[in-house]
Amino acid sequence: MAELKITSENFEREVLQSDKPVLIDFWASWCGPCRMLSPTISEIAEEYKGKVKVGKVNVDEESELAAMFRVSSIPLLVVMKDGKVVNSSVGVRPKEQIVGML
């Protein structure tokens, strides 16, 4: 699995200090649309390895991060560059749209 598990402990190092854009997938194990989106996120992580970091945040385990991003619906995809949110979308999206966000 090329995706990183993003936690409160590694968020600053892996996301805020990243020299590459970071795609974060906020998800939960009980969320059907999140499970539908997961293979697409894995594909993007493989295809863009070295160019983009892809991380997953389990909203049930990381309520602090979910609150920080005001997550009210999942799946939520957030693109961050230089420590700032530059793009986001809620719901399942085709791979092309997600890549376009990057």
Image: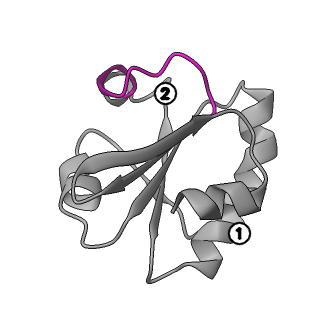
Q: Residue tagged by mark 2?
A: 59
| Residue at (34, 42) in percent of width and height | 7
**Structural crowding at the residue carrying mark 1, measured as other residues with C-alpha within 10 Å and reported as few (<14), some (14–19) or many (≥20):** some
| Nearer to us in this view, 55 or 19 | 19
Q: Amino acid at mark 1?
A: Glu
Q: Position of residue 36 (x, y in %)?
A: 81, 43
Query: In the image, which disc is placed on residue 43?
Result: 1
Q: Amino acid at mark 2?
A: Val
- The correct choice, above or below, for 26 with respect to 40 in the image is above
| Residue at (22, 44) in percent of width and height | 9
| Residue at (69, 55) in percent of width and height | 97
| Nearer to us in this view, 73 or 59 | 73
Disc 1 to disc 2: CB gap under 8 Å = no
SS under mark 2: loop
The colour scheme used to paint the residues is one colour
Point out the stretch of residues depicted in magenta: 66-75
So how many labels did they put on this image? 2
Q: Is residue 69 left or right of residue 90?
A: left
Q: Main secondary structure of the magenta part?
A: loop
Residue 37 magenta-drawn? no
Q: Position of residue 55 (x, y in %)?
A: 47, 55
